Image (cartoon, rainbow, N blue to C red):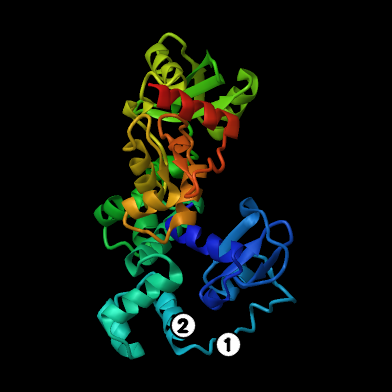
């Protein structure tokens, strides 16, 4: 999930009316789209798709919610109206207007508009525009366009600009994305530990998945489902050293953060994961401390979401992040496992 999507999902989860007009969200299970502050039952994140405007949602086959009437929105706050207008401008594939020009046209200073945009939308104007371009590249590739054409048509001035700014948001090269990562060779192994089974998978670049659970069958099944078009093979001997590091990590004796990684993530998620890998063995941080560490002290919920999205347990030690009151909070692999990991690391 991109930084922009994380911000939009927070608005939906919190029913934030202040973002009305900035985007709409659609629910695949009901085929209905709503404004962010809609009072209807909160949908499952996996069923939600975001659109910049009601028209885009309608074209995609969704119908307007009769409760919140997202197709009949009037923005009365002048500053919010300026933010909505800025969003519409930045969404244009052929946008050539600079921020200073947009600000002057809307009657604001550039500094004020940038600050207000970040406060309302949750990401900077530059990140917002890059997210729009990256999404257009995805859509173009899915339609079967050649990579170069997909990049240029999305609004990038050159392929170099895309590879510098857009490619990391795909999580893989454009050609592989269009082909669904088909042909990728992924090796895996499983190891028994005191905390249960650990299943680890790697590409040629590094660890791409570490899962914890009570049995190997379900873990391996989940691993193969995660990479459906890749060639997934078991390699106990070749991954014995990696397995040894992870097994030692469950006992607090080895630090798995030294393992090389090959993970797909948003720029924000990667910043969070890097901060987690910097937490020393035997220490913990609160979600708010991690948010402050990456320079976004208000993004506490987003930090928690990035922890939950972590696909490499132990190698990215999200178990070392706790709540401000000292309680453990959640953990994808079970609160008992989190408690045991922290206890083992504290003893060492």
The residue tagged 2 is 80
Report which quarter residue 97 is drawn in: bottom left
Judge from the rendering whether residue 47 lies leftward or rightward of residue 139; answer left or right: right
- Residue 274, compared with residue 10, is above or below; it is above
Identity of the residue drawn at 38% across and 30% down: 282
- Residue 282, compared with residue 108, is above or below; it is above
Where is residue 16? Give x, y as percent: 57, 71
Where is residue 291? Give x, y as percent: 38, 53
Q: Secondary structure at mark 2?
A: helix
Q: CA distance from mark 2 to mark 1?
A: 11 Å
Judge from the rendering whether residue 192 lies leftward or rightward of residue 292; answer left or right: right
The front one of 23 and 161 is 23
Report which quarter residue 280 is drawn in: top left
Q: Earlier in the sequence, mark 2 or mark 1?
A: 1
Where is residue 346? Give x, y as percent: 41, 27
Residue 292 visible, this orientation: yes
Where is residue 281? Give x, y as percent: 35, 29
Judge from the rendering whether residue 308 lies leftward or rightward of residue 162; answer left or right: right
Residue 183 visible, this orientation: no
Identity of the residue drawn at 62% across and 58% down: 48
Identity of the residue drawn at 53% across and 31% down: 339
């Amino acid at each position: 999930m991109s930084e922009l999507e994380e911000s939009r999902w927070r608005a939906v989860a919190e029913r934030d009316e202040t973002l009305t007009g900035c985007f709409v969200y659609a629910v695949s299970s009901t085929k209905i789209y709503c404004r962010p502050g809609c009072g209807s039952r909160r949908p499952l994140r996996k069923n939600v798709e975001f659109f910049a405007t009601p028209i885009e949602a309608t074209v995609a086959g969704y119908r307007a919610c009769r409760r919140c009437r997202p197709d009949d929105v009037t923005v009365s706050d002048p500053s919010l109206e300026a933010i909505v207008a800025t969003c519409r401008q930045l969404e244009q594939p052929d946008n050539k207007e600079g921020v200073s020009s947009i600000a002057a046209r809307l009657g604001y200073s550039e500094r004020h508009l940038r600050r207000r945009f970040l406060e309302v939308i949750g990401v900077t104007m530059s990140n917002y525009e890059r997210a729009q371009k990256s999404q257009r590249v995805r859509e173009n590739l899915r339609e079967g366009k050649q990579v170069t054409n997909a990049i240029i048509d999305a609004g990038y001035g050159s392929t170099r600009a895309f590879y510098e700014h857009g490619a990391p948001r795909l999580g893989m090269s454009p050609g592989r994305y269009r082909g669904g990562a088909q042909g990728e060779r992924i090796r895996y192994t499983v190891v028994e530990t005191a905390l249960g089974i650990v299943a680890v998978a790697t590409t040629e670049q590094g660890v791409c998945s570490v899962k914890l659970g009570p049995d190997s069958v379900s873990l391996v099944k989940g691993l193969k489902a995660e990479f459906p078009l890749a060639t997934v093979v078991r390699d106990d001997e070749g991954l014995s050293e990696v397995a040894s590091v992870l097994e030692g990590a469950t006992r607090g004796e080895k630090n798995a953060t030294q393992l090389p990684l090959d993970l797909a993530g948003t720029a924000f998620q990667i910043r969070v994961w890097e901060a987690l890998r910097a937490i020393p063995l035997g220490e913990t941080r609160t979600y708010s401390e991690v948010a402050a560490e990456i320079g976004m002290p208000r993004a506490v919920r987003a930090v928690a979401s990035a922890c939950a999205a972590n696909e490499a347990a132990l190698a990215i030690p999200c178990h070392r992040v706790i709540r401000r009151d000292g309680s453990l909070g959640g953990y994808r692999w079970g609160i008992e496992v989190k408690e045991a990991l922290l206890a083992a690391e504290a003893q060492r």
